[in-house]
Image (spheres, rainbow, N blue to C red):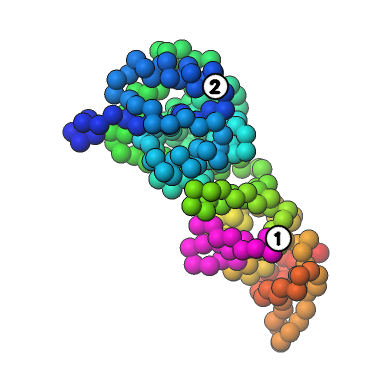
Amino acid sequence: MSAEKSLHKIRVLLIDDEELARQLLREYLAAHEEVEIVAECTNGFEAVKALTELQPDLIFLDVQMPKLNGFEVLELVERRPAVIFTTAYDEYALRAFAVHAVDYLLKPFSAERFAEALQHAQNLLGREQAVPFAELATAARGSNSPLERILIREGTEVRVIPVGKIDYLEAQDDYVAIKALGQTHLKAIALAELERNLDARRFVRIHRSYIVNLERIAKIELYAKDSRRVVLNDGAQLPVSRAGYSKLQALI
């Protein structure tokens, strides 16, 4: 650990919806003078807000929580502290370790196992190595499970958009504009990444800049020589490339 870091305590955030679980973490952390708890959160929305405002060095994070699960919390965070998962479910362990999570504590765990995990985190902080949150979120969902909702952070607030409510998505530089329920929301992500995680039976890349929800298409029309567009139920018109038209023909 660098000399500068050694002068400061490790700032820790506890994120768990169970009071007894947080109490145990507090008791275990009390034995480590190099650590201070800056806040506790009982659900995913609180966690995103606290992570954004407090910017802790290390978080102890439950996976199964109300509103947002632990991996969804990570997806919404820009600054990346070290993460130790604490959960009663072992089904996420291999996924977490596959993307180099700091550690994974399966409840109930002993003070000795806790201290081992904390040491792993301290070693990571000493190397100043970032945790790959985007990969963690993808791993948690599983490669065969399409997105069911898209999460967008607006300041310290979180907006949850069910994919079934989406009309279409449009690439805009480093963002994707998500059109849903008459509103537009921007998410800092590549359109290709969203395409990989959406259900290909429902969402089609019709153009390099557009993905459309098949259920929203009213018609496909020819408006110039070899040029087509889709008209959605609300009247919106989107361009269709040749490759996109081939995909639509195969699905509609």
Mark 1 Cα-neighbour bin, 10 Å: few <14, some 14–19, many ≥20: few
Which circle marks residue 181 in the picture? 1
Name the image quarter holding the C terminus.
Answer: bottom right
Which residue type carries mark 2?
A: Glu
Specify whether 97 is left or right of 81. right
Q: In this view, does 9 lie above or below 252?
A: above
Q: Does the magenta stretch include residue 16?
A: no
Q: Is the magenta stretch mostly helix, strand or loop?
A: strand
The residue lying at 56 percent from left, 66 percent from top is: 171
Residue 62 in percent (x, y) is at: 53, 29
The residue lying at 68 percent from left, 47 percent from top is: 148
Q: Earlier in the sequence, mark 1 or mark 2?
A: 2
Q: Residue furthest left?
A: 3
Q: In this view, does 100 lie above or below 105?
A: below
Residue designated by label 2: 19
Residue 246 in percent (x, y) is at: 72, 69
Residue range of the region highlighted in magenta in the rendering = 170-189
Q: What element carries label 2?
A: helix
